[in-house]
Image: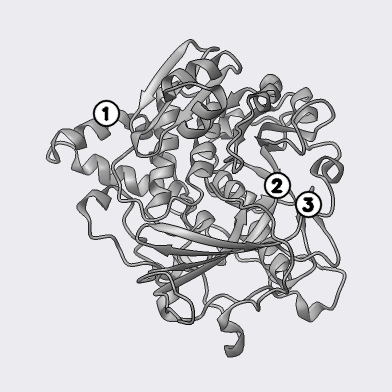
Amino acid sequence: MSVQAYDPLADQRTPEGPRFDVFLAGTVFLDIVFTGLPSMPVSGTEIWAEGMGSCPGGIANLAIATSRLGLRTSLAAAFGDDDYADFCWRTLAEQESVDLSRSRRFAHWHSPVTVSMAVDRDRSMVTHGHPAPMPATQMIGTPPPSRAVIAALASDEPLGEGNWAERAHREGALIFADVGWDPSGTWRPELLDQLTICHAFMPNAVEATAYTGTDTPRDALYAIADLVPLAVVTDGANGAMAIDSLSGEEAYVPAPRVTALDPTGAGDVFGAGLVLGTLCRWPLADRLAFAGLCAALAVQQFGGSLAAPGWGDIADWWHAARARAGHGGAYAESLARRYRFLDRLVPTVPMGAVRRAVATIARHADLGMVAPPPEAAEGPPADRSPEAATGPPVDPAPEAAEGPPADPDPEAAEGPPADPDPEAATGPPADPAPEAAEGPPADPDTPPVPAHKE
């Protein structure tokens, strides 16, 4: 795991403290994202996309989001012995500074794959894969010491006695819980019984009202505040509200105005920002504002972990927002007041701070990182032939490397400006074989697993 160029928790670290700030467990998908489609393809036709990106997805969205914010992140996930797994492992460990010491490689189990197609600021996805070969609790054993854990409420592996998250809770980690969409529509309220070990619960407005049986997001917030010390309800473009019963704070913070191109992974990015603010002991309103900003920066770009911002992006945005204050109208003044707390943070962000990847994930998102030696660039060894350890190639097409075109909408101007050094943002170009540039081959027909995105 590489050392990040900016550490927001540097003043809290001691030799006796936990090695990791955040520990996660879940399923890693290989995400292939097509952008700039004029329409969805119809039967018997072919559509060309303006851009394409490939990156680790699923739980990797959250791991990358926390790591890019400077949180020392450890991830437990099952990885197959195929090229996709090599690519995802290498990207997470070498580029995105995610520790994988609790992850495992499994022979004869292939990586789940999702193809996402973005059309008219929405996306459709096709996923193929199999359940993990081993339950997370069995694979993890004793979780590594960490300040926080982000876990999902689930019926198959509840967060109760004997679960890995409960073990982490006993060791002092704060448990931040999320919950997924219920495709059955039953929204069983007993799922919330798992919150007894949790410090925070952060569902979106639809999930919150459905699981609590309330009529409005605010009513749901009060119901959740009876169950956990930190209750948070997100409401997309409307912002987020929260109650922290430990500090006695209650806050509502609107979301920054942006033109959203792709909401994939926005909830993960919000959660990462909230965890960071909580570990830094910021006031509740600042935590919500920061988390909302991270999510707003993400939705202006295409593709899950590709879009997760780093401190370099946040610094760029704040410099631009502060420059508009005084001559940008009431809204610009409101932003400047709401995010004034960034003034004490951004001046310490180095020029080499992490920035988001562009199009296909870059070799090194952290501009301050030193490139690994050639022998380290092949990724972790697998129990098979070494020539298969290179992972899927990066798309070499120039139009794919540039990503989606800049949004001309003035509302989108609140996001960070484009990195003036495209080569630094995308990393050194790959030189894959021409026949490999069309992406991974189709997988044989097998039963799918449930969708994994928000």
Determine which quarter of the picture holds residue 418: bottom left
Marks 3 and 1 sit apart, C-alpha to C-alpha, by: 43 Å
Q: Residue at x 77, y 78 (%)?
A: 388
Pointer 3: residues within 10 angstroms few (<14), some, or many (20+)?
some
Which residue type does callout 1 highlight?
Answer: Arg
From the viewer's perspective, is residue 431 above or below residue 269? below
From the viewer's perspective, is residue 425 above or below residue 270? below
User: Which residue is label 3 attached to?
Assistant: 103
Q: Residue at x 48, y 10 (%)?
A: 248
Describe residue 364's horizontal placement relative to residue 102 as left or right.
left
Foreground residue, 452 or 268?
Answer: 452
Describe residue 274's horizontal placement relative to residue 370 as left or right.
left
Check if mark 3's residue and mark 2's residue have beta carbons within 8 Å: no
Foreground residue, 410 or 183?
Answer: 183
Foreground residue, 447 or 359?
Answer: 447
Describe residue 152's horizontal placement relative to residue 140 as left or right.
left
Marks 3 and 2 sit apart, C-alpha to C-alpha, by: 10 Å
User: Which residue is label 1 attached to?
Assistant: 337
Identify the mark nearer the N-term, 2 or 1: 2
Give percent across and percent down for residue 101. 78, 50
Determine which quarter of the picture holds residue 201: top right
User: Which residue is label 2 attached to?
Assistant: 26
Callout 1 secondary element = helix
Give percent across and percent down for residue 390. 70, 75
